[in-house]
Image (tube, rainbow, N blue to C red):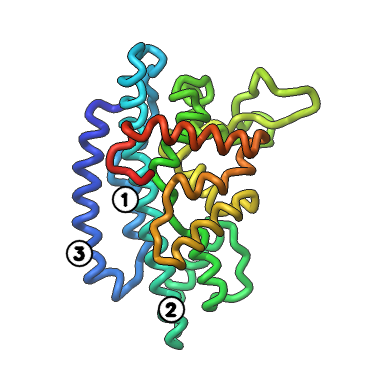
């Protein structure tokens, strides 16, 4: 991890947030160039390519704080990118509903988002944009942190240390990742290797927002949005029933971890 990464990220993110407000006044109304703003967020900091030795921290409280503090700014950055994408889709939906025609640039950006979130749209219309909005939405910070702790053994797993994989994501092409020692005979999956921790968090969020296995997660979130309620971790965790073969037992474990670690999840939704 680069020295001062957390502090420099906080400063960079603050500067980007200020820039976003300025850009909303000028760029978004005139060009709707969400990709430019999202790129600025991505480029605001260097990706994290080293993981601290969390197993060397003997004090449990200190280990938990260090783990959450390490991942929190990365989660915040990825959610900021998704928020910008969501705002763009919402603005395009408003234009379509008002009978406005979209420019080639706007259509191109929407098609990029359709691809990113794996939604096959026959037409760019109100129906497809409403469906896209169900996918282009943030993941509660506390849920990300708790699931990362669960899946990575508080950052001490081989997959987190060697492959920057904090969420146990699999891949199915030979050589795409790390072969788990517990893999049964006849199985071909590997634990995916990422180029950075940032890429791992981004992939995890995109997985929840696009994979058919997590349609329930997205439905719960969309239902809460329709009631003008902010989705929280304890509500959305139920949508992860297909994340593990343990299903309900896995949900109970995450909820238990959420309750027991609430005091460490400072200033995030629980």
Residue under the point 57% across and 44% down: 240
Mark 2: which secondary structure?
loop
Reading the image, the residue beneath label 2 is 103
Reply above or below: 111 against 29. Answer: above
Reply above or below: 90 against 217. Answer: below
* The furthest residue to the bottom: 99
In this rendering, position of residue 187 left or right of residue 116: right
Reply above or below: 38 against 10. Answer: below
Mark 3: which secondary structure?
helix
Q: Compare residues 68 and 89 and report the one nearer the observer.
A: 68
**Front position among marks 3 and 2:** 3
Q: CA distance from mark 3 to mark 1?
A: 14 Å
Task: Indicate which disc, 1 or 2, sits on the residue closer to the N terminus.
Answer: 1
State whether residue 42 appears in this view: yes
Mark 1: which secondary structure?
helix
Reading the image, the residue beneath label 1 is 41
Q: Quadrant of the C terminus?
A: top left
Count all numbered tags in the image, as a single digit.
Answer: 3
**Rendering coords of residue 106 (x, y %):** 43, 72
Q: CA distance from mark 1 to mark 2?
A: 24 Å
Q: Compare residues 49 and 92 and report the one nearer the observer.
A: 92
Task: Say few, some or many: other residues with alpha carbon within 10 Å of mark 2 (under 14 / 14 to 19 / 20 or more).
Answer: few
Reading the image, the residue beneath label 3 is 22
Q: Quadrant of the N terminus?
A: top left
* The furthest residue to the right: 186
Contact between marks 3 and 2 (CB within 8 A): the answer is no
């Amino acid at each position: 991890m680069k020295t001062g990464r957390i502090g420099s990220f906080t400063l960079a993110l603050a500067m980007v947030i200020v820039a976003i407000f300025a850009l909303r006044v000028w760029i978004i109304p005139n060009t709707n160039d969400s990709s430019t703003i999202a790129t600025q967020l991505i480029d605001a900091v260097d990706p994290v390519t080293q993981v601290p030795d969390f197993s060397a921290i003997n004090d449990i409280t200190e280990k938990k704080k260090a783990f959450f503090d390490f991942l929190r700014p990365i989660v915040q950055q990825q959610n900021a990118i998704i928020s910008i994408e969501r705002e763009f889709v919402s603005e395009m939906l408003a234009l379509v509903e008002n009978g406005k025609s979209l420019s080639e640039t706007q259509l191109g950006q929407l098609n990029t988002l359709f691809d990113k979130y794996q939604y096959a749209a026959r037409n760019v219309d109100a129906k497809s944009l409403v469906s896209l909005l169900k996918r282009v939405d943030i993941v509660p910070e506390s849920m990300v942190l708790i699931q990362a702790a669960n899946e990575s053994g508080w950052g001490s797993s081989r997959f987190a240390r060697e492959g920057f994989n904090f969420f146990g994501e699999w891949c199915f092409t030979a050589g795409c990742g790390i072969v788990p020692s517990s893999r049964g005979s006849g199985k071909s999956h590997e634990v995916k290797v990422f180029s950075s921790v940032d890429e791992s968090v981004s992939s995890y969020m995109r997985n929840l927002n696009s994979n058919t296995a997590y349609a329930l997660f997205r439905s719960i979130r969309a239902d809460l949005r329709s009631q003008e309620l902010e989705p929280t971790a304890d509500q959305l965790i139920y949508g992860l029933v297909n994340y593990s073969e343990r299903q309900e037992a896995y949900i109970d474990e995450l909820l238990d971890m959420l309750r027991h670690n609430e005091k460490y999840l400072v200033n995030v939704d629980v």
